Amino acid sequence: MPVARPQYQYAGPAGPNPWFLPRSALWWIYWLVCLGGLAALVFQLLPAAVLTWSGILVGLPFAVVTLLVIATLILWLDLFRAHVRIVNVLAMGFVWGAAGGTGIAMFANDNITRIVQNVFGDAFAENWQAPIAATIVEESIKGLGVFTVAWLSRPLLTRPMHGLLLGGFTGLGFQVIEDITYEANAGLLSAQGDIGSALIVGVLRLFTGFVSHWMLTGIAGIGIVTALGAPGWSRARRAVVFAIFYLLGAAMHFGWDSPTSDDSGLGGTLLKGVLFVVIFVVVYLWVVRTEQRWFRALVDFVAAQRMAPPDELNTLVSRRARHRARKAQRVPHRIARLRRHELLDWAQAVDAHLTATGGAILNRPTGSMITEPGAR
């Protein structure tokens, strides 16, 4: 039997197109940083690339796989398809991380490590210059990119999930280019030659990529975007959320680069990875709860306005509810997926319209009509 479509028409995206805002000084700064960082990256990487180009070619497929797998993972984490109306925003974050962030970070890291050596001595610097430099420089430049893109994209970004997505793609851009730089430098530092070193580095970076920059900057991005755009939140609450998530991402980066005991080896790295996954899962579950509150409030609104009946939307509140509904209706997975995407994209369009016209439903105090099937 045919399914009813929600009775709502949406003319286009809310907010400015962040790719082209020539009247904004910050927009010009964004492009100056990206182009300047790209030039710095080429200047610093080219001498090594000329000597180890074969290693780069061997390692490049690992970087491409990392890009595709992590990008897919980030989008899978987006329970309500919040990315559909901020694709341009996410692309700008990725460009900042890839073009601007890596080149600037390479230059700044060298200077920070020299300062650590001069102030604390070679013995201390041998163990701690990498975590100190990375925490200060890399998290700052990536966080600045998230802030810049989020500011240019107002009022499109209003929820913690937006911050996770923007931070995730900004960090992913940085991560992919950093992988390539590691592969370029590996041949210079190893007696195994360009190809052998690139293979080892490529495999290691691929497997550790699941707990790399995309995760760290995704966590920090939650705090940055929430501080800038969360509707109905007090300044104090925004400041606390920003401090918690940004410092958490920076602390995780410091912990990852910190030295481990000599006998820990691979086991120490695996332990860190498991710990990072646990931390991220806890953070992600909080983000999902905020998304579910937003979705429930949205359904209350559209039901009150008689824009759509809440019954079918009720099945989208969680992955478990979706599975139960599909099983009960005996709908093929492909058809159920298409219908789910249609409804969720429509819900994002409603939210975009409300945001553009000054509506704020995230903190709606009333109860929700949404409950998971079978829940009491």
Image: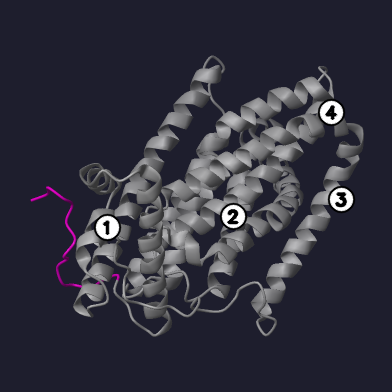
Q: CA distance from mark 1 to mark 3?
A: 62 Å
Q: Position of residue 106 (x, y in %)?
A: 74, 47
Q: Which residue is mark 3?
A: 43
Q: Position of residue 92 (x, y in %)?
A: 63, 63
Q: CA distance from mark 2 to mark 3?
A: 22 Å
Verify whether residue 374 appears in magenta. yes
Mark 4: secondary structure: helix
Q: Which residue is mark 4?
A: 188
Q: Of the residues tagged 2 and 1, which is closer to the observer?
A: 1
Amino acid type, callout 4:
Leu
Q: Position of residue 295 (x, y in %)?
A: 29, 63
> Does the magenta stretch mainly form a helix, a strand or a loop?
loop
Amino acid type, callout 1:
Met
Q: Quadrant of residue 37?
A: bottom right
Mark 2: secondary structure: helix
The one of 157 and 142 positioned closer to us in this rendering: 157
CB within 8 Å, label 2 to label 3: no
Badge 2 or badge 1: first in the primary sequence: 1
Q: Quadrant of the N terminus?
A: bottom left
Residue at image location 30% in from the left, 59% down from the top: 290
Q: Which residue is mark 2?
A: 170
Q: Residues within 10 Å of mark 4 (few under 14, many from 20)?
A: some
User: Up-down: is 225 above or below 304?
Assistant: above
Residue at image location 59% in from the left, 68% down from the top: 148
Q: CA distance from mark 2 to mark 1?
A: 44 Å
Q: Position of residue 208 (x, y in %)?
A: 56, 32
Residues shaded magenta: 362-376
Q: Which residue is mark 1?
A: 1
